[in-house]
Amino acid sequence: MAYVAGSSAGRNRTRQDGPGNERAGAPERTSLSAHARDAVRERIVDGRYPQGARLVEREVAEELRMSRVPVREALRALVGEGLLELLPHSGVRVRRMERADVEHLYEVWEPLAVQASRLAARRVARSAPAEPPGVTALRTSLDRAEQAASDDEGAREVAAHTAFHEDIVALSGNPMLARTMEQLSGQLQLLFGMREEPEHMRAQHAVMFRYIATGDEESAAASTLLHVRDSRAVALRSLFDATSICIPEGADREITPPAPTPH
């Protein structure tokens, strides 16, 4: 995917035409930076920029057919996301995910994912009998993941699974949670693309969806907790051959909803 920047003449006019026009050019530069960030992130996640690879600003800019300024901003942002790391003297490289990195990521993601599912289900319950638009987005991501798995298209399946978790956060309606999760998004995409995806984990998504769509807060939270912990075990085993890590017993079972609290 190539993102084409505006002409150099246009950029020069922006610099030369005075303060007002310079401010007018800022949104365009921000947009280009966002495009560059998405393009570089995509290349990291799908392996075109492998872990440990050094990224040269000039070469990335040439590949994306952009000027170096938005690319520089994009690389800086991806350092903040944890996908790139600064080299001791200059430049950046794609960060290698070590075992400790994976464990730390799951330690942070687990409570956030559980709370996102709980809040999403709560929002559905409060909207009844109407269905929030976010439920449709969740259902669509789930269907896309199943179709991608059926077509044996791993990259498309990873994208759909990532979208499923992002859609839960969006449905939660909590902007602070969304901003926090955004910081983890790139690393989660990378991790999902690296590890295997057992069939029973796709089934867990269907269970999570059902509880969220019916507004069952605690069952949604419990099924998400099971899924994230299972995902962690699978990631550690598949990435680091951690034979001592096993999938939790009953990981492919559905969560039994808690008994109603008597009033």
Image: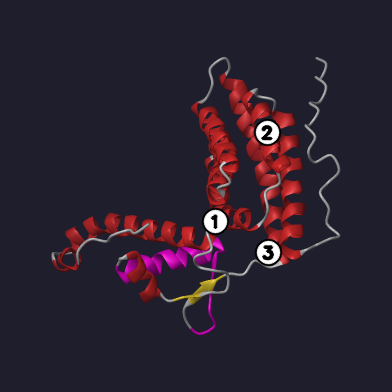
Q: Which residues are magenta?
A: 67-89
Q: Main secondary structure of the magenta part?
A: helix
Asked if 124 appears above or below 9 in the picture, the reply is above
Q: Is residue 176 visible?
A: no
Q: Residue furthest front?
A: 151
The residue singled out by tag 1 in the image is 186
Q: Residue at x 84, y 39 (%)?
A: 250
Q: As shown in the figure, which amino acid type bears the numbered disc 2?
A: Met
Distance from Cα at disc 3 to Cα at disc 1: 13 Å
| Marker disc for residue 101 | 3
- The amino acid beneath tag 3 is Asp
At label 1, counting other C-alpha atoms closer than 10 Å, the crowd grade (few under 14, some 14-19, many 20 or more) is many
- Residue sitting at 67 percent across and 56 percent down? 195
The percent position of residue 7, horizontal first and vertical second, equals: 19, 64
Give the SS element for disc 3. helix
* Tag 2 residue: 208
